[in-house]
Image (spheres, helix red, strand yellow):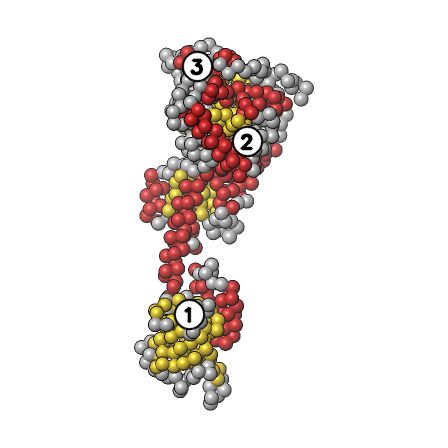
C-alpha cells in the first residue's frame, strides 16, 4: 500500500452501455477518429477489445471547451483513458474483477428522441447493482428538427447558436428524460447545471454524427474519475485481470483477450484461470497488442511485449487455453503463492452459478458467451421463475443437444436451449431439428425471454387442448323443473356451487333402496345449456339467476335414466369427477380453477369415493 500515491494514477477504465441503436458504436468511432486521421504522435491506440486515449489526445480533444465553451479545464493527472469498446457485450458491466466491477465509470447512452428503452433500464439496473458511477450521454441531438451542426463543438456553445424552436424542443425532450430517470428513482440534471455530480446523474447532450458534445463527455469522464476516484485509480502492483474473450487465431492457436486493470504481467508468468472442466494453470507464451494505427505497412499484425503495465487490453497466448471461460478472472501465481488456493478462487465464480441449477433436474438448458452474460441470464430466469437444468459457456455443440434431449420425455416444453450471444454448430443444429429440441438465439436477454415465453405458452395451450376432454369442472345443482323425462333428459336447474360447462358428466348419489349402499347413478353428459333461450358454453354460478335449462344425453353403451324413476327433484345433481379428471385440472388448468372450486372438489371427493 505504501507504493500507492495520488500522483501515480493508472488510466480509468470506462465502458459504454445502452439500448440497441442508441449510437454506442458511432459515439466510440467519433471519440476515436479525430486523432486517427491526424496521425499525431500522442495517438490513440487501438488495443485488444479496448481503445486507449493518452492524456495528450484528451487535451487535444477538450481544447474546444476552453476556446468556444469558455470553461476552465482541470489539470489532468491520469495518464489516459481506457475505453472498453465492446458495445455488443451488454453483459460487460457484469464482468467483475475481484468482486468490484471491471469498469470504474460507465457511459449510458440514451437516445434523446426515444428516452429510456428496455435495455437501457436493464443496463441501469446492472450499474446500480454493481454501484458503478455513470454519466448519461443524451445522444442524437442532431436529429432535432432544424438543428444546425458545428462539428466537434462544445455543446453549450452549439446550443446557444440554435434557433429558439430547436432550443425549446431540446428543453422539452431533456425534461422528459429527467422525468423518466425520476421514475426510476434517480435525480438527473444537465451536467453544466449539476452542482452535486456525486448525488445527481449528469446528462451530456451529444451527437455521434457531428461530434458535438463529445469533448464535454470526455472532459466530464476525466474530471469525475480524478475528483471522485483517485484512491481507486492509484497504481497497485497486485495483478487484477479479467478475460474478455477466448478466440482461436490462425498461427497463434487459442488465445485470450484480457483487460489488465491493475499490476504488471510478464512473458513466462504462471497464470491460473477458470476453465469449463476445472481450473487451468499455464504459462504466458506471448503478450500481444495490435500495431499502432499509423504503422499499417508492417506485415506482422501484433506487437510482442516482454511486460505490460496496467489499464490496457492485451492478447495472451499460452498452452491449454481451449476451455478458458470468457468473463472470468485471471490470477497470477507468484513463487510465494499457494497454487491450490488460487485454483479454488478462480473456480468460485463458476461454482456460484451452479446454485442456479434446479435440483429436480427439470428445466431449460442455457448457453452464453461469457461468465457475465450467463450470470445476467440466470438472474433474469430466476426472477422469471423459469427452471434451469444445465448451463454451459461457449458455442453449442452436439453434446449440449444430447444433454438437453433428456428433457423430451420429462417435460417437452422445457426441451429447449437458450443461446445467448453464442454460435450454434451446424451438426448440433440439424440434430436438434431431428430430435425436436428448440434452439432460441438472441443477443438481448429480452428477445430470448420473449421467444421462449411465446413458445412455452403455445406448448401449454396445446397440452390444455389435448387435456380438455378429460377435465371435469365441479358443480352442485338443484333441480327446479323437468321438461323432458328421458332421451334426452332436459332439466331446469339452479347452480348451488361451481360452474356448468358443455361436456360435464352429471350424476346423482343416493342409497340403494334394497341394500342401503351408496349408489352413483350416471345421468350422462351435458350437450347444451340455455339461459332465456340463449345458448351458452359455460354458465357460472353468478350468471344463473333465473335458472338454467340443461340437456343431458347418455352414451350409446349406457342405459337411459329416467326422471321420476331413477332420480327426482329432491336429489342433488353433481358433476362426476374422477381421480384422473382432478389430476388434469391440477396439471393443465390450475390457474383457471378458483379456490371455491377446489373446496367443492374436496367436498365431492368423499361422496364419489375418490381417494
The residue indicated by pointer 2 is 188
The residue indicated by pointer 1 is 500
Q: What is the number of the mark on residue 441? A: none
Q: Nearer the viewer, residue 585 or 593?
A: 593
Question: In the structure shown, which secondary structural element does the residue marked by tag 2 occupy?
Answer: strand
- The answer to whether 338 is drawn above or below residue 392 in the figure is above
Q: Position of residue 30 (x, y in %)?
A: 42, 21
- The answer to whether 538 is drawn above or below residue 152 in the figure is below
Q: Residue at x 45, y 73 (%)?
A: 495
Mark found first going from the N terminus, 1 or 3: 3
Residue 343 visible in the snapshot: no
Residue 337 visible in the snapshot: yes
| Real-space CA distance between mark 1 and mark 3, rounded to the nearest whole angstrom | 77 Å
How crowded pointer 2 is (Cα within 10 Å; few <14, some 14-19, many 20+) is rated as many
Q: Position of residue 546 (x, y in %)?
A: 43, 74
Mark found first going from the N terminus, 2 or 3: 3
Q: Nearer the viewer, residue 336 or 15?
A: 15
Question: In the structure shown, which secondary structural element does the residue marked by tag 3 occupy?
Answer: helix
| Real-space CA distance between mark 1 and mark 2, rounded to the nearest whole angstrom | 57 Å
Question: In the structure shown, which secondary structural element does the residue marked by tag 1 occupy?
Answer: strand
The residue indicated by pointer 3 is 35
- In front of the other: label 1 or label 3? 1
| Real-space CA distance between mark 2 and mark 3, rounded to the nearest whole angstrom | 32 Å
Amino acid at each position: 500500500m505504501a507504493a500507492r500515491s495520488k500522483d501515480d494514477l493508472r488510466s480509468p477504465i470506462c465502458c459504454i452501455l445502452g439500448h440497441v441503436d442508441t449510437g454506442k458504436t458511432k459515439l466510440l468511432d467519433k471519440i476515436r477518429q479525430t486523432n486517427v486521421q491526424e496521425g499525431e504522435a500522442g495517438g490513440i491506440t487501438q488495443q485488444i477489445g479496448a481503445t486507449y486515449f493518452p492524456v495528450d489526445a484528451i487535451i487535444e480533444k477538450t481544447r474546444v471547451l476552453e476556446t468556444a465553451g469558455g470553461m476552465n479545464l482541470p489539470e489532468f493527472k491520469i495518464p489516459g483513458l481506457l475505453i472498453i469498446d465492446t458495445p455488443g457485450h451488454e453483459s460487460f458491466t457484469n464482468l467483475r474483477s475481484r468482486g468490484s466491477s471491471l469498469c470504474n465509470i460507465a457511459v449510458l447512452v440514451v437516445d434523446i428522441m426515444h428516452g429510456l428503452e428496455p435495455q437501457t433500464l436493464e443496463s441501469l439496473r446492472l450499474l446500480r447493482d454493481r454501484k458503478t458511477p455513470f454519466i448519461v450521454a443524451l445522444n442524437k441531438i442532431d436529429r432535432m428538427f432544424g438543428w444546425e451542426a458545428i462539428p466537434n463543438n462544445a455543446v453549450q456553445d452549439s446550443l446557444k447558436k440554435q434557433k429558439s424552436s430547436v432550443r425549446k424542443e431540446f428543453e422539452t425532450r431533456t425534461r422528459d428524460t429527467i422525468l423518466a430517470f425520476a421514475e426510476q428513482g434517480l435525480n438527473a440534471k444537465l451536467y453544466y447545471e449539476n452542482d452535486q455530480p456525486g448525488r445527481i446523474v449528469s446528462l451530456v447532450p451529444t451527437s455521434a454524427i457531428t461530434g458535438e458534445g463529445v469533448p464535454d463527455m470526455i472532459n466530464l469522464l476525466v474530471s469525475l474519475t480524478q475528483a471522485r476516484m483517485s484512491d481507486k485509480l492509484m497504481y497497485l502492483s497486485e495483478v487484477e485481470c479479467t478475460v474478455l474473450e477466448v478466440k482461436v487465431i490462425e498461427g497463434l492457436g487459442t488465445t485470450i483477450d484480457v483487460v489488465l486493470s491493475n499490476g504488471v504481467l510478464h512473458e513466462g508468468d504462471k497464470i491460473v484461470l477458470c476453465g469449463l472442466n476445472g481450473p487451468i494453470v499455464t504459462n504466458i507464451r506471448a503478450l500481444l497488442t495490435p500495431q499502432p494505427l499509423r504503422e499499417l505497412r508492417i506485415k506482422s499484425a501484433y506487437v510482442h511485449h516482454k511486460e505490460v503495465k496496467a489499464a490496457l487490453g492485451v492478447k495472451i497466448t499460452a498452452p491449454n487455453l481451449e476451455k478458458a471461460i470468457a468473463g472470468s478472472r485471471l490470477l497470477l501465481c507468484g513463487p510465494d503463492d499457494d497454487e491450490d488456493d488460487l485454483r479454488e478462487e478462480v473456480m468460485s465464480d463458476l461454482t456460484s452459478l451452479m446454485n442456479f441449477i434446479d435440483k429436480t433436474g427439470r428445466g431449460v438448458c442455457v448457453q452464453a458467451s461469457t461468465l457475465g452474460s450467463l450470470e445476467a441470464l440466470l438472474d433474469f430466469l430466476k426472477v422469471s421463475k423459469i427452471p434451469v437444468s444445465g448451463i454451459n459457456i461457449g458455442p453449442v455443440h452436439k453434446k449440449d443437444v444430447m444433454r438437453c434431449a433428456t428433457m423430451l420425455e420429462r417435460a417437452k416444453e422445457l426441451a429447449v436451449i437458450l443461446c445467448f450471444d453464442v454460435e450454434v454448430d451446424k451438426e448440433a443444429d440439424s440434430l436438434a431439428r431431428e430430435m425436436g429440441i428448440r434452439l432460441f438465439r438472441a443477443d438481448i436477454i429480452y428477445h430470448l425471454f420473449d421467444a421462449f415465453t411465446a413458445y412455452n405458452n403455445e406448448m401449454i395451450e396445446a397440452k390444455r387442448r389435448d387435456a380438455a376432454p378429460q377435465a371435469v369442472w365441479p358443480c352442485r345443482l338443484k333441480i327446479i323443473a323437468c321438461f323432458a323425462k328421458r332421451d334426452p333428459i332436459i332439466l331446469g336447474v339452479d347452480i348451488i356451487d361451481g360452474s356448468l360447462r358443455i361436456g360435464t358428466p352429471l350424476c346423482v348419489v343416493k342409497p340403494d333402496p334394497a341394500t342401503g349402499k351408496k349408489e352413483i347413478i350416471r345421468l350422462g353428459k351435458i350437450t347444451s345449456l340455455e339461459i332465456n333461450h340463449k345458448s351458452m358454453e359455460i354458465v357460472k354460478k353468478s350468471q344463473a339467476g333465473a335458472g338454467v335449462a340443461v340437456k343431458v344425453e347418455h352414451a350409446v353403451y349406457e342405459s337411459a335414466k329416467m326422471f321420476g324413476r331413477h332420480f327426482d327433484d329432491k336429489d342433488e345433481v353433481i358433476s362426476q369427477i374422477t381421480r384422473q379428471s382432478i389430476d388434469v385440472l391440477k396439471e393443465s388448468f390450475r390457474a383457471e380453477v378458483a379456490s371455491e372450486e377446489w373446496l367443492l372438489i374436496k367436498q365431492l371427493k368423499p361422496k364419489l369415493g375418490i381417494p
